[in-house]
Amino acid sequence: MWILAFIFSQSILNVFSEDLHSSVYFVNASLQEIVFASTTGTLVPCPAAAVSPATLRWYLATGEEIYNVPGIRHVHQNGTLQIFNFLPSGFSKLIHDNTYYCTAENPSGKIRSQDVHIKAVFREP
Ligand SMILES: *[C@@H]1O[C@H](CO)[C@@H](O)[C@H](O)[C@H]1NC(C)=O
Ligand SMILES: *[C@@H]1O[C@H](CO)[C@@H](O)[C@H](O)[C@H]1NC(C)=O
C-alpha cells in the first residue's frame, strides 16, 4: 500500500515537472554532495530554479524549512544557501553536516531538488 502510494506520487511529480519544465526546472541535478572547509564556509546555489519571479526555499531532508542563523547560516534572496566559516567549537551537526534540498516555486508550479548532503571538514592549523 505504501509502495503503491509512493509510486503514484512519483508519477504525478514526473508529469508535473515535465509539464512545467519551461517555468520551473533543475539547474544541476548532479549536485548531490558539498564538502567544504570549516575555515572558509560555502555558498550553495539552489539546484532547482524557476523563471522569475520565483520563491526559492531550502529545507532539511526531514522536510523542516530552515531558518537563518546570524553569522552561521543564511539563505540569500537569489536562493543561494550560505554556511559561514566557523570554529570547531561552533560545530553543529544539524547545520554543518546535514542533508538539504531546495524548492523553486512560482505561480505556474513547484519543483523540489534532489537531496544535497552538505558537510564541513576541519582543517587543523
Ligand atoms: C553540477 O555539480 C557538480 C558537482 O558539484 C559539478 O561538478 C558540475 O560542474 C555542476 N554542473 C553545473 C552545470 O553547474
Ligand atoms: C547570490 O547572492 C550571494 C550574496 O549576495 C552571492 O554571494 C552569490 O554569488 C549569489 N549567487 C548567484 C548564483 O547569483
Image (cartoon, helix red, strand yellow):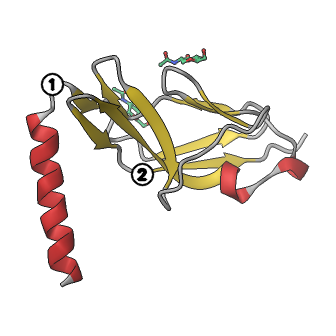
| Position of 119 relative to 82 (above/below) | below
Ligand 1 quadrant assignment: top left
Q: Circle 2: is it few (<14), some (14-19), or many (20+) Cα within 10 Å?
A: some
Find residue 99 and report its horizontal and vertical position in percent: 53, 54
Expressed as whole percent of the image width and height from the top left, the position of residue 6 reads 21, 70
Q: Relative to 93, does residue 42 appear above or below in the rendering?
A: above
Task: Judge left or right: residue 20 versus residue 89.
Answer: left
Please give the name of the residue rendered at 41% of the width and 28% of the height, measured from the top-left corner: 55
Q: Secondary structure at mark 2?
A: loop
Q: Quadrant of residue 35?
A: top right
- Percent position of residue 15, x then y: 9, 47
At x 64%, y 54%, the residue is 97
Q: CA distance from mark 1 to mark 2?
A: 22 Å
Q: Residue at position x 42%, y 47% from top? A: 32
Task: Point out the residue furthest to the front here.
Answer: 107
Residue at point 50% right, 48% down? 59
Q: Amino acid at mark 2?
A: Asp
Q: Which quadrant is the N terminus positioned in?
A: bottom left
Residue 11 vs residue 97, the one in the foreground = 11
Residue under numbered circle 2: 115
The circle on residue 30 is none
Q: Which residue is mark 1?
A: 22
Q: Position of residue 53 (x, y in %)?
A: 34, 17
Q: Quadrant of the C terminus?
A: top right
Q: Amino acid at mark 1?
A: Ser
